[in-house]
Image (spheres, rainbow, N blue to C red):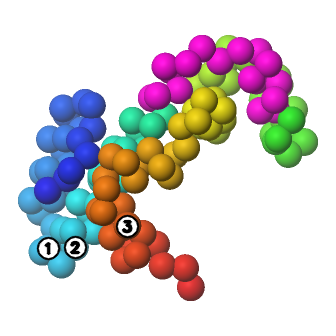
Amino acid sequence: MITVKHPLEECNRQQEEFLSKVSQEERRFHELFFAVGNASYLYYQRATDFDPSFTDFEEWLEGLSENVRLDMSKKGFEECKTVLSFRRYVNEKNDIGMEEYIENLMGEEYQEYKEKYLKQG
């Protein structure tokens, strides 16, 4: 069962349909994978809870490599409001860390996912 649901019901339906077709051995991985993906989606949606300022944009640009910074500068503040790394910057600046956010939503299942499927070799 997918514990963290997607806010769009069609996505939940598609995920459940997919799970009904995978082998029992693969099912747990995909349940956890979907939960992490759904939690990540929710995390990035949280950035819309905040009204990023142009100062936030300038601070974020400072941390980018030169070629990316130039590209994002050309796109401008308004267009970059939808860029995931900028959204994450805004969340982090407002004390909402992605790792902690996902762990709070998934609980022990997030640890299970990391231990079983994100092994560092």
Q: Does residue 19 sit above or below 100 in this rendering? A: below
Q: Residue at x 71, y 15 (%)?
A: 53
Per the rendered image, the range of residues in magenta is: 45-61
Residue 102 is situated, as x and y percent measured from the top left of the image, at 41, 49
Q: Earlier in the sequence, mark 1 or mark 3?
A: 1
Q: Which residue is mark 2?
A: 26
Q: Does residue 98 sit above or below 86 in this rendering? A: below
Q: Is residue 87 left or right of residue 63?
A: left
Q: Secondary structure at mark 2?
A: helix
Q: Is residue 57 left or right of residue 86?
A: right
Q: Quick check: marks 2 and 3 in contact, CB under 8 Å?
A: no
- Real-space Cα separation, disc 1 to disc 2, in angstroms: 5 Å
Q: Secondary structure at mark 1?
A: loop
| Amino acid bearing label 3 | Gln
| Amino acid bearing label 2 | Glu
Q: Secondary structure at mark 3?
A: helix
- Real-space Cα separation, disc 2 to disc 3, in angstroms: 18 Å
Specify whether residue 116 is in view: yes
Q: Residue at x 55, y 79 (%)?
A: 120
Q: Residue at x 33, y 46 (%)?
A: 105
| Mark 2 or 3, closer to the camera | 3
Q: Quick check: marks 1 and 2 in contact, CB under 8 Å?
A: yes
Estimate how packed mark 3 is, as few (under 14), some (14 to 19) or many (20 or more) residues with alpha carbons within 10 Å: few
What type of secondary structure mainly makes up the magenta span? Answer: helix
| Mark 1 or 3, closer to the camera | 3
As for residue 30 lying within the magenta part, the answer is no
**Numbered tag placed on residue 23 in the rendering:** 1
